[in-house]
Each structure stands twice: as C-alpha cells, then as structure tokens.
C-alpha cells in the first residue's frame, strides 16, 4: 500500500501543506520541497500532529 493524502497542515508562516501517511510503513510525508519524509506515526492523527510540529519550525 502506498502513502495516501490524509489532510493539510499549516506551517509557522501560515502556508498550507498536504500530508501523506503510509499506514503499512507508518511513514509521514509533507508536500514541502516535493514530498519530504518527516518521521513515522502510529495513526493518521499522530501523522497530522508530527507533520504540523515539523512544519511549525520551518
């Protein structure tokens, strides 16, 4: 199974980015400079939180 788009999050500069999560591999990706892997998550909600936290510092 490949990663699927699960939503959008905003960065610290308030720009919106799409978030993908691969449920099988648990990888989280953000549409920042292409698709950037930002970590792993145990659920879709956790993936959104990790993506938002990663983007907030950008």
Image (spheres, rainbow, N blue to C red):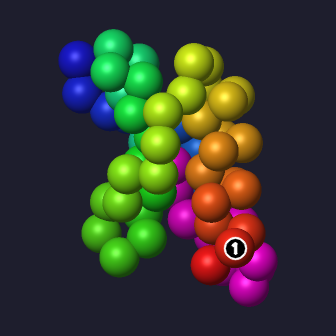
- Mark 1 nearby-residue class (10 Å; few <14, some 14–19, many ≥20): few
**How many callouts does the rendering have?**
1
Give coordinates of residue 31: x percent, y percent: 42, 63
- Judged left or right of residue 4, residue 13 is right
User: Does 34 lie within the magenta span?
Assistant: no
Look at the image and tell me whether residue 11 can be seen: no
In the picture, the quarter occupied by the N terminus is top left
Look at the image and tell me whether residue 53 can be seen: yes
Q: In the displayed image of the protein, which residue is found farthest to the bottom? A: 13
Q: Residue at x 48, y 33 (%)?
A: 40
Q: In the displayed image of the protein, which residue is found farthest to the left? A: 1
- Judged left or right of residue 55, residue 27 is left
- Judged left or right of residue 43, residue 45 is right
In the picture, the quarter occupied by the C terminus is bottom right
Q: Which residues are magenta?
A: 9-19
The part of the image, by quadrant, that contains residue 32 is: bottom left
User: Does 17 lie within the magenta span?
Assistant: yes
Give coordinates of residue 25: x percent, y percent: 32, 21
Give coordinates of residue 52: x percent, y percent: 69, 55
Q: Secondary structure at mark 1?
A: loop
Q: Residue at x 76, y 77 (%)?
A: 12
Q: Residue at x 69, y 73 (%)?
A: 57
Residue under label 1, please give it.
57
The part of the image, by quadrant, that contains residue 49 is: top right
């Amino acid at each position: 199974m490949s990663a699927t788009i699960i939503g959008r999050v905003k960065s610290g500069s308030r720009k919106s980015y799409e978030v993908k999560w691969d449920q099988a591999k648990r990888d989280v990706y953000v549409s920042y400079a292409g698709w950037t892997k930002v970590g792993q998550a145990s659920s879709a909600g956790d993936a959104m939180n990790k993506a938002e936290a990663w983007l907030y510092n950008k």
